[in-house]
Image (cartoon, rainbow, N blue to C red):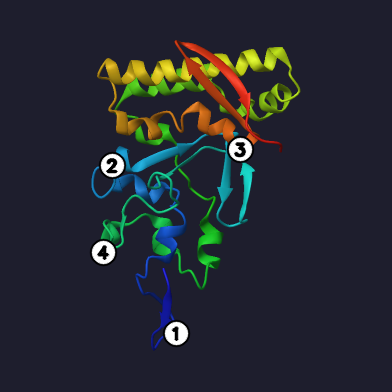
Amino acid sequence: MGTKKNETKEPVCRRCGTCCRKSTPALHEEDIIRIGRSLAWEHLCTLRLGEMAFDNVEGRLKALEAEIVKLRSLPGSAECVLFSSTEGCQAYQDRPQECRVLFCEEPEALAAMYEKGRITRMDLLSGAPALADAVRMHEERCPQREVPALCRKARTQDSEAVSALLGMAALDAAIRKFLVERGAAREEWLLFLLGRPFPETIAPFGLSVRESGGVYALETTRRI
């Protein structure tokens, strides 16, 4: 949000919506109590270990060294799902911790706490052991941390890497479908529970997955 100076020289948010349109906050330990209050699982997404993601502080795309749970963006946009152009933040009075410390003209406070006390999916799934087990199984069978190296090898026509990526693509899709069809999870929870669908996580490497009749194929979309 933008700022103005009050008599004590402290920054005051103008609620202009600039930061809400550019990115979404990661969640921290202080935000756990907000789940079920101002935030819900359908508002969240998970960026997994090894996934390519934009670092708000460094201002660049990089492979994540740890899992991040954050508010999701609107489809095809960087804008926060809780932001309304007419009404502003729908959770402003109970907004996440990063939003509370961020002043767009003075980002030092956000940079200081950016990687401290971040939570993971397991911090929010203690009361849902079956879903926690499904998340662990998905992470074990579709390890995102291995994807960057596999993608680089696949681009050199390494058949084992191609096979591994296609196997992950098929299993990722199957697990998502299974959880929803069996009533274990709602469709809108999947971005939080399992992260982004597999095709989206390999897109930064110039690759895509095409599926036809249950058969998956890997394609190169661009040079990198």
Picture quadrant where residue 146 is located: top right
Disc 1 crowd, CA 10 A, few/some/many (<14, 14-19, 20+):
few
In the current view of this chain or complex, which residue is farthest to the bottom?
A: 7
Alpha carbon distance from label 2 to label 3: 28 Å
Which residue: 52% across, 28% down?
199
Q: Nearer the viewer, residue 82 or 74?
A: 74
Circle 4 SS class: loop
Mark nearer the N terminus (2 vs 3): 2
Expressed as whole percent of the image width and height from the top left, the position of residue 92 reads 29, 61
Q: State the quadrant of the C terminus.
A: top right
Residue 211 in the image: x percent, y percent?
49, 18
Q: Earlier in the sequence, mark 3 or mark 4?
A: 4
Q: Distance between the residues labelled 4 and 2?
A: 22 Å
Looking at the image, residue 167 lies above or below residue 128: above
Q: Tag 2's secondary structure?
A: loop
- Which image quadrant for residue 184? top left
Label 2 with label 3: CB-CB less than 8 Å: no
- Residue occupying the point 33% across, 43% down: 43
Say which mark, if any, is on residue 86: 4
User: Separation of disc 3 and disc 4 at Cα?
Assistant: 33 Å
What's under tag 4, amino acid-wise?
Answer: Thr
Q: What amino acid is at disc 2?
A: Ala
Query: In front of the other: label 1 or label 4?
Result: 4
In the image, residue 119 above or below residue 178: below
SS assignment at label 1: loop
